Amino acid sequence: MMKPELFWRLARFATVGLVVMGVFVGCNWMLGRWLAEQAAFLVAYPPALALHFALSKWWTFGDRSAASSRQLGEYGAMVLVTFAIQWSVFTGLRQWTTLPGWAAAGAANLVQMAASFGIMQVRIFSRRAGAAVIEVRK
């Protein structure tokens, strides 16, 4: 049985994911009018990441502390892993299907969401991970 706290955290994470995906797909669609599809994907990625970090930290995981260098570094490492997943899926969908770029970007975003939640839950925004860093510094 799932704990209520975990259920609501997953619900908030899904909401954040949908909002960020909407911003990302919308940026891809808008930028795709002037840029090549892959360039639009790359340009839309950073603002979507900034929004994702902020909403995940403060709303999904309830971390009200200032963003730490540990969190930013670990988030950056997670981004590299999930970007590789997302870019591969996006490129594959564009190559092997007739999906437009914005739709392929949205589908690719969905694929990497499970890995992102797990890493953020266990490592980046875990109260235990932050406490371990504080204990080491003392």
Image: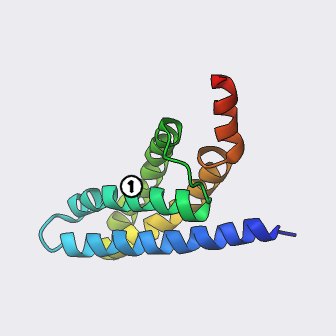
Residue at 39% over, 66% down? 93
Would you say 95 lies left or right of 58 here?
left
| The C terminus - image quarter | top right
Q: How many labels were placed on the picture?
A: 1
Quadrant in the picture for residue 34: bottom left
List the residue tagged with mark 1.
Answer: 87
| The N terminus - image quarter | bottom right
Inspect this view and state whether residue 102 appears. yes
Q: Position of residue 44 (x, y in %)?
A: 28, 62
37 versus 116 height, above or below: below
Residue at 82% over, 67% down? 3
Depth order, front residue of 80/55: 55
Q: Position of residue 112 (x, y in %)?
A: 52, 59
Q: Which residue is outermost to the left?
A: 34
Depth order, front residue of 137/85: 137
Q: Position of residue 113 (x, y in %)?
A: 55, 62
Label 1 residue SS = helix
Q: Residues within 10 Å of mark 1 (few under 14, many from 20)?
A: some
User: Looking at the image, what colour scheme do you see?
Assistant: rainbow
Quadrant in the picture for residue 88: bottom left
Residue at 47% over, 36% down? 69
Depth order, front residue of 32/74: 74
132 versus 119 height, above or below: above
Would you say 33 lies left or right of 57 here?
left
Inspect this view and state whether residue 97 appears. no
Q: Position of residue 37 (x, y in %)?
A: 23, 65
Residue at 43% over, 48% down? 84
Report the amino acid beneath label 1. Trp
75 versus 5 height, above or below: above
124 versus 107 height, above or below: above
